[in-house]
Amino acid sequence: MSSTFTAESSAEMLAVAFARVLRGVDIAAPLDSVLTFVDALGLVGIEDRDCVYWAARCTLARAPEDIPVFDRAFAVFWEHRESPSALPEEELRITIALDAEEDGAADGSAQAGDEPTITLRFSGVETLRDKDFTDYSDDEMRQAQRWMEKLRVTGTPRESVRWVRSAKGSRPDMRRTVRASLAAQGEPVRRKWSRHGTRPRRIVFLLDISGSMEPYARALVRFVHAGVAGRQRVEAFTLGTRLTRISRELSSKDPDRALRMAGSRVADWSGGTRLGETLRTFNDEWGVRGMARGAIVVILSDGWDRGDPQVLAGEMQRLRRVAFRTVWVNPLKVTPGYAPLARGMAAALPFVDEFVEGHSLDALETLTKVMNRA
């Protein structure tokens, strides 16, 4: 082999030169195939003609009808391999196709041809994951809504009162055992078993819609809608100057319609907040009576309360006695140097099992993991 190909980049030079020859005789040589050819030359070397031939044929000759032309092109190339500079210069054109994630698959307008094509996929949501909800535009909020709909908002499994079939359960299933024995002349050869079934725990969202929460409430209500519309035993209430149940309004799969109905249902949006009094109403009318028993209760609030903090502490203690887990989501927790100094937050925190952030998409994804944790 000539000294032209004795440099460290000899394999790359040979591969690029031969790819130009193939393109000159109308044989496609895509960029990824040329790179594979380079890797193959790194393994077999460039001294032996047969090794180079088969490395090129396996990586660059795709169609059977191209083999005769490929063989003649390789023979000419190998004969003149010592003078690659004599090969015609070719301008390498690379097509860069931008494919947004939400656009789905390519529509065929950017079909790969003879020119090498590099497809760059990007997701607009990835740039929003760490962004604070208060900085979102309307378009970004709609993108976030689509991402929230993909989250799995469901509670951990719990044992139900129903019995289900099991290969080895906690009690014999006499009915199935007797039925199976009929095939063995009444002898219970194989015993059948049953066990308690499971179902996901109920999740109860209590969303603070006071004026201090307004910048975050418009994003968090979309997250709550994603949970309710997912049909996974999710209930939703708003906390303001009064308690309002919005589960039925948010059950629509259409987010715009659901949010519009919820907005018309809630009369105290962006008003004051009395967390203690509204939690008392929830405990008296819904929670302690059954809805919160064994459930995962998620309170989304910054903790600012105009009421008596002792009332809030007492109601949080009542709630904790019946709930499986209480989770407090505070969008302000991410603030550098944050401390739960607000009267409401300080009063409630001793009765909270999980205290998490709620200012961004990443924070909401963490929240779903907390809810799914047994």
Image (tube, rainbow, N blue to C red):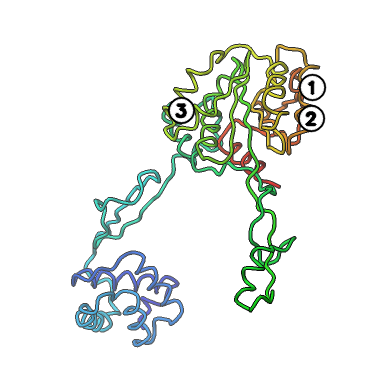
CB-based contact (under 8 Å), mark 2 and mark 1: yes
Q: Nearer the viewer, residue 188 or 254?
A: 188
Q: Position of residue 356 (x, y in %)?
A: 68, 34
Q: Under tag 3, what secondary structure?
A: helix
Is residue 116 placed above or below 101 in the rendered structure? below
Mark 2 or 1 closer to N-term?
Answer: 1
Q: Quadrant of residue 180?
A: bottom right
Q: Under tag 1, what secondary structure?
A: helix
Q: Under tag 2, what secondary structure?
A: helix
- Real-space CA distance between mark 3 and mark 2, rounded to the nearest whole angstrom: 32 Å
Q: Residue at x 38, y 76 (%)?
A: 5
The residue where tag 1 is placed is: 313
Q: Position of residue 85 (x, y in %)?
A: 27, 71
Could you tell me the amino acid type at mark 2?
Phe
Mark 1 or 3 closer to N-term?
Answer: 3
Could you tell me the amino acid type at mark 3?
Ala
- Real-space CA distance between mark 2 and mark 1, rounded to the nearest whole angstrom: 8 Å
Q: Position of residue 232 (x, y in %)?
A: 56, 41
The residue where tag 2 is placed is: 351
Q: Quadrant of residue 328?
A: top right
Q: Quadrant of residue 372?
A: top right
Is residue 359 placed above or below 83 in the rendered structure? above
Is residue 58 placed above or below 234 in the rendered structure? below
Q: Position of residue 316 (x, y in %)?
A: 76, 26
- Real-space CA distance between mark 1 and mark 3, rounded to the nearest whole angstrom: 33 Å
The residue where tag 3 is placed is: 258
Q: Nearer the viewer, residue 165 or 19?
A: 165
